[in-house]
Image (tube, grey):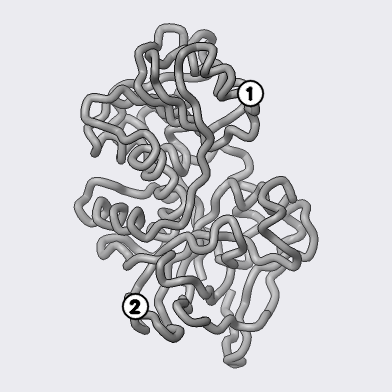
Amino acid sequence: MKYDTRADALMWAIQQRNWGGMEQLELVEIERPQPLPTEVRVRVKAAGINPVDVFTREGKAYMRALTLPHVPGWDICGVVDAIGYGVTRFKPGDEVFGMPWFPRQAGAYAQYVCAPSGHLALKPRTLCYEAVAALPLAGLSAWQMLVDVAATRPGDRILINAAAGGVGHLAVQIAKRLGAYVLACTSREKHAFVRTLGADEVIDYTVPGAYDAIGDLDTIIELVGGDICLRLLRCLRKGGLLISAQAAWAPNLRDEAAKRGVRATWFLVEPDRTGLEHLARLVDEGALRVHLASKFPLAEAGTAQELIARRKTMGKIVLTL
């Protein structure tokens, strides 16, 4: 659709007034935000969609950090069009990307977003806006799990489940860049895809006993949650580490790990300008690519969220503005 921006004080955004199904997502005109000191305002060119967007829409996650009415989304890529007092890192016209404010409201499903300059980085030169908008939350999750938490070293044996998904397909590539030996878990129809990302071994998790022969792992990047967290613990070497981005669905994970002589920890991504800069560098060096599964206009945010909620997507889904 074509957006009318004649009223300079307003912008188009997706807003929800109640938690619930995708029917709660409405295209509305709301007030355009103004940057405070240390903030920049970004004219959003594209916004990434993540599973956490679905959980928050349904009222299942981070409710203490969010209020209604709510503009969803965190991943953005666009152009700085205004800066607040004190900002020295960016100027109007700079192309930037980031995951501001997470888990507080960022309001990414909108034409404009204001964010601290420290939550953003310059956009990679070699990717389009849509591909870069798909990178921040998933890319930072993969980077922080592998670098900040696991301290991955060359030769480490790392298993990544949901390896064809948004975080997983980036984690495979980053782990390989760090010199790890990567075992990628996904369904059979996605095996060829994860092999193109550099996976050394591919495991079909739908086969009974798929994990029985796997052992001596240094690290597991766990992206599914629930019982699989507990089953994967047996694949670690003594002292090995399982990092789960879905540990909320396995509350006894740490206790079970301790019984086996291994380690386990929960994980939640944080805004991180340094991590974004590393991701941008990897992209421009050709060491990291983002797979875009689908693109939707802003008005079809509900349809886009419904697609990602099926958990069958390879790579990422984005909204275009």
Q: Amino acid at mark 2?
A: Phe
Q: What kind of element bears circle 2?
A: loop
Location of the N terminus (image quadrant): bottom right
**Residue at image coords 55%, 50%:** 50
**Residue at image coords 55%, 57%:** 102
Question: Quick check: 226 left or right of 222?
Answer: right
Residue placed most toward the observer, 305 or 65: 65
**Residue at image coords 34%, 82%:** 91
Disc marking residue 90: 2
Residue placed most toward the observer, 82 or 186: 82
Instruction: Examine the image and state in which quarter residue 66 appears.
Output: bottom right
Q: Which residue is mark 1?
A: 252
Q: Percent position (x, y) of residue 237?
A: 38, 14
Query: How much space separates mark 1 and mark 2, taking CA atoms?
Result: 45 Å
Question: Quick check: 186 left or right of 278?
Answer: right
Q: Amino acid at mark 1?
A: Asn
Q: Percent position (x, y) of residue 171?
A: 37, 38
Q: Percent position (x, y) of residue 303?
A: 64, 54
**Residue at image coords 51%, 39%:** 267
Pointer 1 or 2: first along the chain:
2
Does residue 228 show up?
A: no
Question: Quick check: 52 left or right of 265?
Answer: right
Disc marking residue 288: none
Instruction: Examine the image and state in which quarter residue 259 appears.
Output: top right
Q: What kind of element bears circle 1?
A: loop
Query: Above or below — where is 47 with respect to 189?
Result: below
Check contact, mark 1 vs mark 2: CB within 8 A: no
Query: Above or below — where is 219 with respect to 274?
Result: above
Please identify, in this view, whether the residue under mark 1 or under mark 2 is nearer the observer.
Answer: 1
